[in-house]
Amino acid sequence: MRWLIAAMTVTILLALAGHALWLILAYGATPAQILQRIAGEEEAFIDPLPFAELLLQAHTDLFFALMSLALLAAVYIRFTKESPVTAAAVTTLFASALLAPIALLMVPLAGMAAVLLWIAASGLWHLLALYMGLSSLLALGRSR
Amino acid sequence: MRARLYRRVAAWCALFALAIAATGLWLAGVTSEGFQRPIDYSIPTRLKIVVAHLFGMGVLLFVLLHFLLFSEPTSMRRLVATAVGGTLLILSDQLLVPFLPSFIALPLSFATALLFAAVATTLLFRARGGARTPPPGSQKAEGSSLFEGRSRQGRSAESRSPAAAAESAGPFGEA
């Protein structure tokens, strides 16, 4: 069972890293690039992304986050001592993962503010998930 | 109690399931120009959508059943009913899309998808609340619960190392 949990955690961490990399490649690495990609820019003859495409991104991101975070949080809870920090980490993880697609959908309306919110929320849940996965793996390794 | 944290995760899952259903409905509304124009996809495109949804909804049902199994005392009859009912809803939702005309398939598909999301959310919130007393005929009442089975072995999960406890615990731990 220990190897199974370790393999699942490593796979989820790799999927999260790939997801973050894919987001950077698809939308850009800086807030200005992301805004230009989503909202378009007339002077550079760049069309805005269709809203249906943003909705599809939010729809698939929500599913990806639900599956990966439910498993990762379950493993993390199992391998750490219960404390207010654990509860806060789980809540922050899911709240930021839910906030990220909402911010993405707000980009055509709110512009740069929504882009910054999306970057912050996405970065936060990816980093928190990385921390949870690594601490679970460390706990697994220590207990051998 | 770790169970409280697992229930919190279940509640978040329920919220995510609702958000996924809402964005899916919104996406269909945007694609069909406010449901004024029937969505006329080619069969390969429809199958592409169906395959992704069969996978997604199937995995959601799998996770939901695990939360039910590990979060509260649940009778085997209820678990089987949820599994069979959920699978039938998924199949009826997804098989309606590619093989029926849009004007019939869309409302039926939305109805079944929303029903699936509603059932999933209700069950996850029930798992979140947890049952204090085991219902008659439940696994715990019969002494066949996974959790009870472990405690009968005289191995308290809290006194063991996390990995040793995980050796016998399910992926969602012990309630």
Image (cartoon, coloured by chain):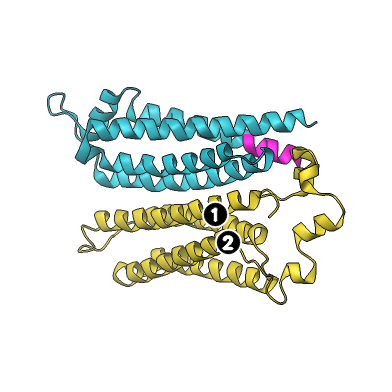
Chain colours: A cyan, B yellow
Which residue does the image show at 37% across and 31% down from the upper left? A120
Chain that bears disc 2: B
**Mark 2 Cα-neighbour bin, 10 Å: few <14, some 14–19, many ≥20:** many
Quickly name the residue at label 2.
B127
Instruction: Assign the C terminus of chain A to one quadrant of the image.
Output: top right
Quickly name the residue at label 1.
B10
Which residue does the image show at 49% across and 65% down from the upper left? B122
Horizontal and vertical percent position of residue B148? 78, 60
- Secondary element under disc 2, as helix, strand or loop, is helix
Check if mark 2's residue and mark 1's residue have beta carbons within 8 Å: yes
Query: Which is more toward the observer, A50 or A132?
Result: A132
Q: Which region of the structure is painted magenta?
A: A1-9
Q: Is residue B92 above or below residue B68?
A: below
Q: Is residue A57 visible?
A: no
Indicate left or right for A87 with B22 as reference. right
**Mark 1 Cα-neighbour bin, 10 Å: few <14, some 14–19, many ≥20:** many
**Furthest residue in direction left, as rendered:** A43
Please state which amino acid type lies under the numbered disc 2. Ala
Horizontal and vertical percent position of residue B99? 40, 67
Q: Which mark is residue B39?
A: none
Instruction: Assign the N terminus of chain A to one quadrant of the image.
Output: top right
**Furthest residue in direction front, as rendered:** A84
Residue at mark 2 to residue at mark 1: CA–CA distance = 7 Å
Horizontal and vertical percent position of residue A123? 43, 30
Q: Is residue A43 visible?
A: yes
Please state which amino acid type lies under the numbered disc 1. Ala
